């Protein structure tokens, strides 16, 4: 069924903000087969001398993740960083209480930084404010960032790393509002420890960028109160407040699930309002930025009962290795559209996670790594979403959803790069209707460079180990440039990238990657 024509208007000379490269961050946690089996697997045919999987490194590069948050997540609240550095044979095995598994500590900070150099990522490190505090945070900071001449900086050098790691961005704990968290705190308790830890860390290095924990989700009973209270304590000491959000279809309700981007949009607006309210109360001129450092589609409702339990403490149990569907990929694309639309306040974001666990990359033992459906919108948005985020006006028809009320069927974001190429990312969230989009660009457009769509006749179609290429992006041949406007047909439940060169007058026939 073809729906009505949807008019989209873009003025490339207006800008929301420069898109921070950190918006395309990732997240690696010691959880399930994320690290052991995912990043490192000495038995794998593509493993290098360090045991790093070469096939995974290639896909991580292709994915285009920038900053990678490490080592958790919930794991960080029991993290003993010193257990994971130095000669491997003398590292202690520990319990990973967050995920009821065993932590061999054969992979730690030094290995992760070496791996990051291979994939070209920036490290974003988290300190443990669950079972530990200021002292351990300062020691980790000294080990990581101090050039030399002190016990811990010399220890790093003795471990083979002369230059400091120079980690700029640090998370002050993780989800400290959550009852599942080791060392859960009240907002007052956390606000105080976040403020004190931040001040102490800045005594060592004033230039750090520090992230205080926001709520674990917008559904937490303390959401709002948590943000305001934490910032009342720590507003002047931190740069960012974190947001975490995971989405999944509830009872097969596809329209509501496809509207997850609207829920994320409301969440961001609320957090910004809380942060600005505290700023105004304090008469401060400082703007708190957002670090959306955990976001994704996660089939969280499938987790209970799948975790190891009792006396079973395996090293890398498979946890949350769901095969993603087309619908999941469209939601991920829409969440990225939402983040781009808030590029003025959301300066950092981490897709959670990276390999195997809640991940765009599947890395089976003994077999080649492959791309889950969500890989595609992320890699293409990361590749082409660099530049100025441009406001997009969409006169969209509405969709009624059970969870989110009335939402737009078509949503879009646009980014103008420094060469004058405009990339427009568009979703059609309608389950029934294709939509014909008429996209007018103020100032016109010289050439249509590309139109690529991710769609399938079955919204629940998934990439799987047996059929890893079921859902892949394809050229959208309906796209035409006429009189400075682009016309394109968007199938139901689809994600699309359109790229136009504003300046060039060369006509482009081929509309593919
Ligand atoms: O990413 C999985 C988990 O989700 C993280 O460990 C935690 O921070 C969040 O609840």
Image: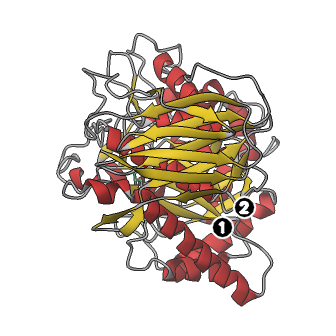
Picture residue at 54% right of the left edge, 61% below the top: 173
Is residue 359 at least partly visible in the picture? yes
Numbered-mark total:
2
Residue 167 screen position, x and y as percent = 71, 46
Q: Which residue is mark 1?
A: 197
> Image quarter for residue 468?
top left
Work out which residue is located at the far top of the displayed protein and give it.
45
Picture layout, residue 221 above or below residue 440:
below
Which is nearer the eye, 139 or 259?
259
Residue 193 screen position, x and y as percent = 59, 73
Picture residue at 46% right of the left edge, 44% below the top: 436
Picture residue at 66% right of the left edge, 83% below the top: 278
Q: Quadrant of the C terminus?
A: top right
> Image quarter for residue 172?
bottom right
Is residue 112 at least partly visible in the picture? no
The answer to whether the residue bearing label 2 lies less than 8 angstroms from the nearest atom of ligand 1 is: no
Q: Which residue is mark 2?
A: 201
Work out which residue is located at the far bottom of the displayed protein and give it.
281
Picture layout, residue 509 above or below residue 4:
above
* SS for dot 2: helix
Q: Are marks 2 and 1 in contact (CB under 8 Å)?
A: yes
Picture residue at 18% right of the left edge, 47% below the top: 311
* SS for dot 1: helix
Which is nearer the eye, 135 or 463?
463
**Quadrant observed for ligand 1 in the rendered image:** bottom left
């Amino acid at each position: 069924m073809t729906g009505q024509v949807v008019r989209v208007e873009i003025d490339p000379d207006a800008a929301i903000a420069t898109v921070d490269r950190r918006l395309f961050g990732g997240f690696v946690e010691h959880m399930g087969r994320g690290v052991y089996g995912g990043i490192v697997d000495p038995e794998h045919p593509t493993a290098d001398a360090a045991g790093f999987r070469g096939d995974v490194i290639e896909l991580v590069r292709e994915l285009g993740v920038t900053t990678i948050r490490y080592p958790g997540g919930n794991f960080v609240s029991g993290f003993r960083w010193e257990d994971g550095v130095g000669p491997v044979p003398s590292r202690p095995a520990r319990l990973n209480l967050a995920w009821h598994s065993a932590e061999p500590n054969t992979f730690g900070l030094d290995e992760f930084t070496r791996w990051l150099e291979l994939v070209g990522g920036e490290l974003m490190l988290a300190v443990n404010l669950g079972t530990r505090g200021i002292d351990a945070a300062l020691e980790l900071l000294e080990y990581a960032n101090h050039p030399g001449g002190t016990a811990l900086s010399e220890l790093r050098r003795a471990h083979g790393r002369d230059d400091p790691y120079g980690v700029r961005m640090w998370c002050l704990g993780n989800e400290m509002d959550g009852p599942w968290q080791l060392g859960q705190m009240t907002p007052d308790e956390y606000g105080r420890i976040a403020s004190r830890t931040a001040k102490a860390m800045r005594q060592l290095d004033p230039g750090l960028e520090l992230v205080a924990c926001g709520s674990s989700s917008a559904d937490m009973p303390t959401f709002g109160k948590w943000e305001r209270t934490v910032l009342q304590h720590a507003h002047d000491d931190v740069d960012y407040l974190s947001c975490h959000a995971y989405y999944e279809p509830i009872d097969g309700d596809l329209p509501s699930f496809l509207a997850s981007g609207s829920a994320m949009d409301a969440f961001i607006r609320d957090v910004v309002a809380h942060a600005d309210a505290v700023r105004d109360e304090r008469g401060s001129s400082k703007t708190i930025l957002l670090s959306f450092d955990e976001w994704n589609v996660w089939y969280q409702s499938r987790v209970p009962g799948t975790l190891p339990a009792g006396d079973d403490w395996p090293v890398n149990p498979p946890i949350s290795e769901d095969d993603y569907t087309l619908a999941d990929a469209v939601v991920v694309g829409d969440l990225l559209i939402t983040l781009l639309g808030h590029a003025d306040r959301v300066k950092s974001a981490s897709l959670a996670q990276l390999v195997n666990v809640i991940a765009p990359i599947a890395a089976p033992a003994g077999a080649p790594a492959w791309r889950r459906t969500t890989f595609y919108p992320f890699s293409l948005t990361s590749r082409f979403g660099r530049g100025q985020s441009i406001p997009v006006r969409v006169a969209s028809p509405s969709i009624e959803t059970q969870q989110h009320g009335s939402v737009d069927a078509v949503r879009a974001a646009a980014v103008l790069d420094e060469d004058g190429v405009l990339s427009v990312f568009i979703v059609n969230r309608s389950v029934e209707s294709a939509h014909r989009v008429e996209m007018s660009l103020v100032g016109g457009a010289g050439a249509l460079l590309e139109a690529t769509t991710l769609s399938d006749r079955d919204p629940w179609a998934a990439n799987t180990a047996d059929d890893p290429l079921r859902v892949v992006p394809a050229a959208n041949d309906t796209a035409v440039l006429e009189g400075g406007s682009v016309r394109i047909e968007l199938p139901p439940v689809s994600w699309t990238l359109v790229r136009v060169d504003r300046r060039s007058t060369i006509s482009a026939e081929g509309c593919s990657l």
